[in-house]
Amino acid sequence: MYIKELIAQHILDVHEGDNWTESNLKNALADITIDEAITVTAGSINTIASLLHHLTYWNRVMVQRINGIAVTIPESNGFEMNPLQNEEDWQNLKADNIRSAHELAEAVKGFDEALLHDPILPGYSSAYKNLQGSSEHIHYHLGQIVILKNLVRSAKN
């Protein structure tokens, strides 16, 4: 398997399972209610929902970078989102995140492997660092989501 296929698979695994950490977004989010997803804790100004929105946003930013588009990142950095109104909104946010993961994985697989050591865009770090960094970024926020889930649930007791 080539490095770009490995990165693409790792992106899917951290979203849907079967990665070495035995933790993934799909399972971590499966039993979170909308009320838990939008609860602000003392541990973070971000909610579980805003973290998931941020990850979805960044998956799509990376697709654009892979396609040669330099995206201007707003100050909100993909955390700002429309408020979730109901369970359907929460389910749609989770489904959109999985769609964005597959979009990113496909874009990574289509990337020219000969260019992995070149800047992904002029003035940026290497394509490899950006693509591998996407997986690391998702793992980082997955950890935050798990911690917030525990904080939200412990506050209820």
Image: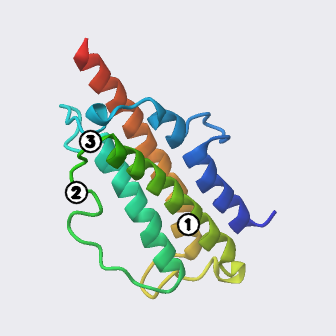
Is residue 141 rendered to the left or right of residue 44?
A: right
Q: Amino acid at mark 1?
A: Leu
SS for dot 1: helix
Is residue 111 rendered to the left or right of residue 103?
A: right
Q: Is residue 1 above or below residue 16?
A: below
In which quadrant of the rendered view does residue 149 lie?
A: top left
Residue that carries the numbered disc 2 in the rendered image: 82
SS for dot 3: loop
Report the Cα–Cα distance between label 1 and label 2.
23 Å
Going from the N terminus, do you reach mark 1 or mark 2 first? 2
Is residue 71 rendered to the left or right of residue 62?
A: left
Q: Residue at x 35, y 56 (%)?
A: 54
Residue that carries the numbered disc 1 in the rendered image: 104
Q: Residue at x 59, y 45 (%)?
A: 16
Going from the N terminus, do you reach mark 1 or mark 3 first? 3
Q: Is residue 104 above or below residue 28?
A: below
Q: Amino acid at mark 3?
A: Thr
Viewer-nearest of labels 3 and 2? 2
Q: How is the image coloured?
A: rainbow
Tag 1–tag 3 contact (CB < 8 Å)? no
Q: Position of residue 83 (x, y in %)?
A: 21, 51
Residue closest to the far top: 157
Number of the label disc, if any, that sits on residue 47: 3
Q: Residue at x 38, y 49 (%)?
A: 52
